[in-house]
Image (cartoon, rainbow, N blue to C red):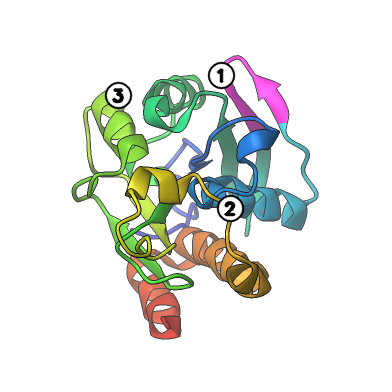
Amino acid sequence: MTGSEADGAVTGPWLVVGLGNPGPAYAGNRHNIGFVVLDLLAERVGGRFRAHRGRADVVETRLAGARAVLAKPHSFMNTSGSPVAALRAFFKAEVGRILVVHDELDIPFGAIRLKLGGGDNGHNGLRSITTSLSSREYLRVRVGIGRPPGRMDPADFVLRDFSAVERKELALVVDTAADAVEQIVTEGLAAAQNRIHPLAR
């Protein structure tokens, strides 16, 4: 799969979804890294998020020439699937061109992994999306946030802000994740993996 539209076979846009929880209280949480990456992508294309009837803030744009919709659901993380399904139906996006950017506990902080399909690995946002789409075959940009220290509950960990040490590196992590999205769109998943995965910590 590639991001090319040259043959005219693909008519639907890329639907790039960042996962997070709405509202300023959650803005700096580890769980909201998907929103942060989407904000950077919007900044790169000079776009401004606007409320959409699909219950998300969206930017309709082009990424390297390809039609794309950047979306941040209005729902809380655990019910992300309903807005994603609504946006998919509205924009007529193919499941294989839905790309979800999310936090990942089982990847060290700063590392990024790209994949197509697979399980949700305990991530409630992904579980909701898979259920609502009736498919696992969507793309993921998995941004590592690491495991909680000691015996801290993972549910508490993801809802805490990044540490002072992590925040020093966060801009680079977000930049690399945004690059990963663009590279999947322009070069396809395998090529993007070859570029991004060697950058792991």
Circle on res. 132: 3
In x, y percent, where is residue 193? 37, 73
For the residues bearing labels 2 and 1, Cβ distance under 8 angstroms: no
Residue 11 lies within the magenta run: no
Against 92, is 179 above or below?
below
* Three-letter code for the amino acid on which mark 1 is drawn: Arg
Q: Which residues are magenta?
A: 50-58
Extreme residue toward the front, this view? 151
Label 2, secondary structure: give it.
Answer: loop
Quadrant where the image shows the C terminus: bottom left
Extreme residue toward the top, this view? 53
Q: Residues within 10 Å of mark 3 (few under 14, many from 20)?
A: some
Ranked by sequence position, the earlier of labels 2 and 1 is 1
In x, y percent, where is residue 186? 51, 63
* Three-letter code for the amino acid on which mark 3 is drawn: Ser
Q: Can the viewer see residue 38?
A: yes
Q: Which residue is mark 1?
A: 55
In x, y percent, where is residue 44? 74, 57
Against 16, is 196 above or below?
below
Against 89, is 117 above or below?
below
Circle on res. 161: 2
What secondary structure predominates along the stretch shown in magenta? strand
Q: CA distance from mark 3 to mark 2?
A: 29 Å
Residue found 58% across the figure and 38% down from its top: 69
Circle on res. 11: none
Quadrant where the image shows the N terminus: bottom left
